[in-house]
Image (spheres, grey):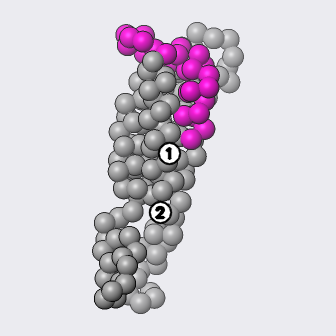
Amino acid sequence: MLLGVSPDLSRRSRYRRYLPWIVAAPFTVSGVLHLVSPATFTPIVPHFLPEPTGLVYASGVCELVCAVGLWRRDRWAGIAAAVLLVVIWPANLQAAITAQQGHVVMAKVLQWIRFPVQIPLIWCALQSGRSPRAGATALRRSGPGEPDQT
């Protein structure tokens, strides 16, 4: 143990800094694809929802907003990304169901793999962002007359 920090805590904090990237990278790519090629995503919008193209554009914008916040490590972005992943989960279920009607076995398998992968992505999103304690530590380090580092 170094300076009272357990090895597990040190290892966790080392990996935690990469968690926003794990969510931000696919959100960035997917958000752009939603806006550039919405027709790719309209078939997976659950059939009971109205305006599938509008929903695809809206989800693309939301993914990009969350990605920007995650790249900046804003606390709200991790929570917003987790909520967005839960909200779009039905679309991934619809994609898996729709893929079963096709003839490409690999597409069928990949869609069913993609569906549960959102669970660890939700966890990564919730672990993202600056912790409130990090900001408090930076404030304590600032001396009198020095600007805050947060």
Indicate the position of residue 42 as horizontal and vertical percent values: 52, 16
The answer to which of marks 1 and 2 sits earlier in the sequence is 2
Indicate the position of residue 7 as horizontal and vertical percent values: 46, 78
Q: Which of 144 and 57 is in front in this view?
A: 144
Q: Main secondary structure of the magenta part?
A: helix
- The mark found on residue 50 in the picture is none
Label 1 or label 2, whichever lies nearer to me, is 1
The image quarter containing residue 102 is top right
Q: Name the residue under label 2.
A: 16
Q: Residue at x 31, y 88 (%)?
A: 144
Q: Residue at x 49, y 48 (%)?
A: 68
Q: Circle 1 sits in a helix, a strand or a loop, which is it?
A: helix
Up-down relation of residue 59 to residue 122 (above or below): above
Q: What stretch is highlighted in magenta?
A: 28-53
Q: Residue at x 56, y 27 (%)?
A: 34
> What amino acid does circle 2 point to?
Arg
Q: How far apart are marks 1 and 2 (CA)?
A: 16 Å
Tell me, yes or no, whether the highlighted magenta stretch contains residue 78.
no
Q: Which of 112 and 125 is in front in this view?
A: 125
Up-down relation of residue 71 to residue 52 (above or below): below
Q: Circle 2 sits in a helix, a strand or a loop, which is it?
A: helix
Q: Nearer the viewer, residue 82 or 119?
A: 82
Tell me, yes or no, whether the highlighted magenta stretch contains residue 35.
yes
Q: Name the residue under label 1.
A: 67
> What amino acid does circle 1 point to?
Ala
